[in-house]
């Protein structure tokens, strides 16, 4: 019968980086006339005094590489992984931020459509899943999906509580109304000249007019804004792109866009503090630190996993 | 915050937080993470209970040595703006306190468990934290930061288990001698605690600068009702000392009659220089109640005071003590009283001497009535006028240079401005230390050399008395300011040797020293090391780093630079950590300006029948 092993390799070895699924934007033709017809100009942000701003993000971690050894079909790879999502909720009246809604999930993902029961690991619950692929990107992709689902859940819950939610990464078709997606990385522009020239002309706290990304996956509003003016930076440094649900009216979308252009520069990370500054926002960076803490000590988790898989009593060192 | 799992140790104890677990706790120190609504200040006392397998419940007592707060979650200094200004960055404010363990009960030195509840120690718990429950005779000497009394274990002062007290602190703040007298006043005011040691206690003190100690019998204008309350909380009715100088009329003091039950004080001062036969005490601030003192040549010889003429550290290097010792012994053999002139002597060869009792001065002999005359008489043996050899019975076989150095110094010392006025024939004007509880000897007007002479002479007398009686009781307490002047770290002198002797043996003989100095590092280590009780006021920063203050915690040292008058750090063998205490103002004037004059309200009126 098949037997489960925890590999001695460091679990992160050869793991793919986290990736935001971003369709090739250059192949998409966007509607640039949803807000402004005619020539584009930078639009200054406007703070509408929203009280609660929730920055939602998640982190994930590979905790062990598994091998399911079957005498008949040979070895099948798998991973044990954890993710944590939560929000840093900024109460602008109280001038204080708190970390809220932290959820931690653990999954054991097996490739090749195989599955095996995970032995009980004291204090850690791994949900078992199975994917068709057998390479690490395929396994990690499932982990990404689970994390993003949890992020969407968190965003939905906070939006229901009355927060304006800034979610990390693009939004999906389930995103509620008062949520914007925050996209840090962009290798291509959705805009073509002459509209694309406005991006370079943006100053900190200004945005482009709204444009509509058409329904290749699903339709949504988007706009670019500049978080900070970077000395000696290129024209795209300090630029981020935001997304909002198409279900919004144009006026509502404009309010959200104005709000982000006014507020997000406040949260921009100073250049010297973070390799991903200024796009990695201050609340997000703090949240990620906190979430990693919630994942627990890596060494302890790995030791507990090995002990459980090898059938040793809890606390025994394998 | 979760509800306390265990019942509080005492109803009066209040939970303040939990033992931190991020770093290791140890049997010596741990940290407390504070509850939201609680605080701990430096010097606060805490207690923690820990279950130790096989031992049971362990109580760990400690004193807060530092108070801290931080933003947890901040990664950079500048995060504080992002956290506090706009509130954009989430962070948790964490307040904590460092605790130095004072006691573990039962004595099993195990670190407290992280996460255990920490309580403020109050009542009996506080007493245990400070070992008061183990003190045979706890004497309250001030109040801790929590307003509760701080105790000195008297067994470690009066010689039972240890002796002596050393007080250090920068000058000008005037707390050193004030604390010394505050302590003396408590000793005399709490006979039920002090016990047998309180009976006939005698205190000898030298006023070496200003006239700060000459007002112990005068109420102070600075003393207020709050101070009186603080005194009563310590169990002592705040009264100045009662004047008891021999020959002075008690009513001569400004104000009222001496309060009943107050300890007595007598003031002594050397006679004024160049005043001829008029015996005026050499003090400027007060005219009443100060008795003049001097030694007669007879007493000078009998009490072997010649050694205290040569107390300069350079004297010892020049073989002068060798000559001095010979001369001193010869004087004792040769001195004969002069008939009809009390205190005067004449030197006469004991060999073949037949007469007993006072002698008449023969032709060719000189009656010695003051130090100059004595010096001249000694000179006749050591440096004969005919230029002949010195009398080896007097000089020993030393080089001529040593003899002339000896004579030069003796003559210089005999000048009226120096020792001259302290030695004169006449009725004995010996300081009577039995006349009052506290004997103040005012030597501030004397030259350094003369000050050392007086201190040496009186200390020797005190010590000799006790040596001869062999009785520890009644106790003699010596209060010595500027100890570094009498027992300096470097060099040799008869005075320093005697102080070391007192420090080492005084404890068993009932001679106890309260030494005060600006910098303990300049005092002979043998003297300091024997002081069981250590007290420190404000310290110079460089001074507090020295090894002499090793008994203080680093945090206490840092704070010692900032102590205000009236606040002291107390170290004693019975309590392994230094305790910061404050003591109330004293009811007597510590300077002439503080003296409450006639016509002003007397705070003791009505208290005294």
Image (cartoon, rainbow, N blue to C red):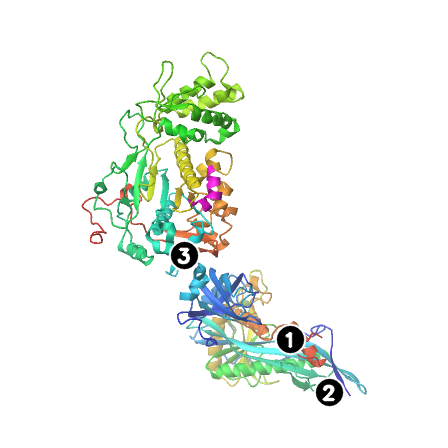
Q: Which residue is mark 3?
A: B137
Q: Residue furthest right?
A: A72
Do badges 2 and 3 share one subunit? no
Chain under label 2?
A
Percent of width and height locating residue B578 = 46, 55
Q: Nearer the viewer, mark 1 or mark 3?
A: 3
For the residues labelled 1 and 2, say whether their Cβ atoms are less than 8 Å apart.
no
**Circle 2: element type:** loop
Tell me the quarter of the picture where residue B328 sits. top left
Up/down of B404 relative to B482, above or below: above
**Circle 3: element type:** loop
At x 52%, y 19%, the residue is B400
Q: Which residue is mark 1?
A: A61
Part of the protein shown in magenta:
B498-513
B527 is within the stretch colored magenta: no
Q: In whole angstroms, how far apart are the C-alphas of marks 1 and 2?
A: 22 Å
B503 is within the stretch colored magenta: yes
The label shown at residue A114 is 2
């Amino acid at each position: 019968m098949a037997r489960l092993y925890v590999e001695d390799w460091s679990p992160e070895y050869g793991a793919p980086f986290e990736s935001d699924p971003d369709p090739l934007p250059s192949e998409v033709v966007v509607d640039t006339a949803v807000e402004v017809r005619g020539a584009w100009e930078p639009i200054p942000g406007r703070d509408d005094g929203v009280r609660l701003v929730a920055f939602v993000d998640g982190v994930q971690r590979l905790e062990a590489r598994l091998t399911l050894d079957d005498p008949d079909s040979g070895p099948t790879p798998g991973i044990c992984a954890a993710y944590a999502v939560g929000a840093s909720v900024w109460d602008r009246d109280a001038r204080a931020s708190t970390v809220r809604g932290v959820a931690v999930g653990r999954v054991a993902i097996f490739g090749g459509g195989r599955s095996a029961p995970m032995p009980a690991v004291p204090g850690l619950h791994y949900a078992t899943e199975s994917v068709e692929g057998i390479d690490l990107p395929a396994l990690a992709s499932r982990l990404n999906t689970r994390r993003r689902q949890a992020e969407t859940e968190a965003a939905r819950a906070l939006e229901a509580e009355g927060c304006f939610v800034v979610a990390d990464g693009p939004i999906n078709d389930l995103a509620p109304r008062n949520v914007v997606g925050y996209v840090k990385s962009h290798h291509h522009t959705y805009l073509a000249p002459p509209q694309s020239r406005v991006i370079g002309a943006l100053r900190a706290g200004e945005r482009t007019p709204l444009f509509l990304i058409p329904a290749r996956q699903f339709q949504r509003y988007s706009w670019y804004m500049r978080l900070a003016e970077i000395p000696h930076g290129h024209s795209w440094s300090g630029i981020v792109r935001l997304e909002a649900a198409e279900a919004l009216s144009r006026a509502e979308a404009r309010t959200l866009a104005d709000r982000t252009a006014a507020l997000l520069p406040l949260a921009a990370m100073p250049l010297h503090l973070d390799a991903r500054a200024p796009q990695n926002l201050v609340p997000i960076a703090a949240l990620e630190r906190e979430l990693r803490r919630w994942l627990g000590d890596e060494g302890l988790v790995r030791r507990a996993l090995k002990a459980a898989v090898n059938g040793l009593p809890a606390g025994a060192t394998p | 915050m979760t509800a306390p799992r265990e019942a509080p140790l005492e109803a009066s104890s209040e939970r303040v937080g939990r033992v931190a677990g991020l770093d290791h706790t140890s049997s010596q120190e741990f940290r407390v993470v504070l509850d939201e609504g609680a605080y701990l200040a430096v010097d606060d006392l805490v207690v923690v209970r820990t279950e130790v397998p096989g031992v049971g419940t362990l109580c760990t007592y400690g004193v807060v040595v530092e108070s801290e707060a931080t933003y947890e979650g901040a990664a950079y200094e500048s995060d504080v703006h992002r956290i506090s200004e706009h509130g954009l960055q989430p962070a948790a404010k964490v307040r904590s306190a460092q605790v130095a363990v004072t006691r573990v009960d039962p004595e099993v030195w195990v670190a407290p468990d992280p996460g255990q509840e920490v309580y403020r120690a109050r009542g009996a718990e506080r007493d245990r934290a400070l070992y008061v429950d183990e003190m045979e005779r706890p004497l309250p000497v001030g109040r801790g930061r929590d307003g509760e009394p701080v105790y000195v274990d008297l067994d470690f002062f009066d010689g039972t288990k240890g002796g002596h007290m050393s007080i250090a602190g920068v000058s000008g703040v005037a707390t050193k001698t004030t604390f010394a007298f505050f302590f003396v006043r408590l000793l005399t005011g709490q006979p039920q605690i002090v016990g047998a040691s309180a009976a006939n206690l005698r205190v000898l003190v030298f006023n070496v600068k200003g006239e700060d100690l000459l007002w112990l019998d005068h109420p102070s204008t600075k003393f207020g009702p709050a101070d009186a309350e603080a005194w009563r909380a310590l169990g002592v009715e705040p009264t100045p000392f009662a004047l008891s100088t021999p020959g002075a009329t008690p009513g001569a003091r400004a104000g009222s009659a001496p309060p009943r039950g107050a300890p007595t004080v007598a003031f002594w001062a050397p006679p004024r220089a160049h005043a001829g036969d008029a015996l005026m005490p050499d003090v400027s601030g007060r005219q009443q109640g100060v008795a003049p003192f001097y030694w007669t040549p007879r007493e000078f010889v009998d009490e072997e005071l010649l050694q205290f003429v040569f107390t300069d550290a350079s004297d010892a290097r020049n073989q002068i003590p060798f000559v001095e010792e010979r001369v001193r012994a010869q004087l004792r053999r040769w001195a004969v009283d002069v008939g009809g002139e009390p205190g005067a002597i004449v030197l006469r060869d004991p060999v073949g001497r037949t007469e007993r009792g006072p002698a008449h001065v023969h032709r060719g002999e000189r009656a010695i009535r003051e130090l100059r005359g004595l010096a001249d008489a000694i000179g006749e043996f050591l440096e004969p006028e005919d230029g002949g050899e010195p009398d080896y019975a007097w000089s020993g076989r030393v080089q001529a240079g040593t003899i002339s150095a000896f004579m030069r110094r003796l003559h210089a010392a005999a000048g009226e401005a120096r020792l001259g006025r302290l030695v004169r024939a006449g009725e004995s004007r010996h300081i009577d230390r039995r006349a009052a509880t506290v004997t103040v000897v005012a030597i501030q007007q004397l030259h350094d050399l003369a000050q050392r002479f007086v201190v040496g002479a009186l200390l020797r007398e005190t010590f000799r008395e006790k040596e001869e009686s062999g009785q520890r009781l009644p106790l003699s307490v010596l209060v010595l300011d500027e100890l570094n002047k009498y027992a300096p770290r470097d060099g040799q002198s008869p005075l320093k040797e005697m102080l070391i002797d007192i420090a080492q043996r005084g404890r068993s003989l009932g001679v106890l020293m309260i030494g005060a100095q600006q910098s303990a590092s300049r005092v002979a280590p043998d003297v300091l090391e024997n002081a069981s009780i250590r007290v420190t006021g404000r310290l110079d920063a460089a001074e507090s780093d020295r090894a002499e203050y090793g008994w203080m915690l680093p945090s206490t040292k840092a704070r010692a630079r900032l102590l205000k008058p009236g606040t002291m750090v107390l170290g004693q063998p019975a309590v392994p950590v230094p305790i910061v205490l404050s003591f109330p103002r004293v009811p007597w004037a510590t300077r002439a300006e503080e003296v409450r004059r006639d016509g002003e309200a007397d705070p003791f009126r009505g208290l005294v029948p």
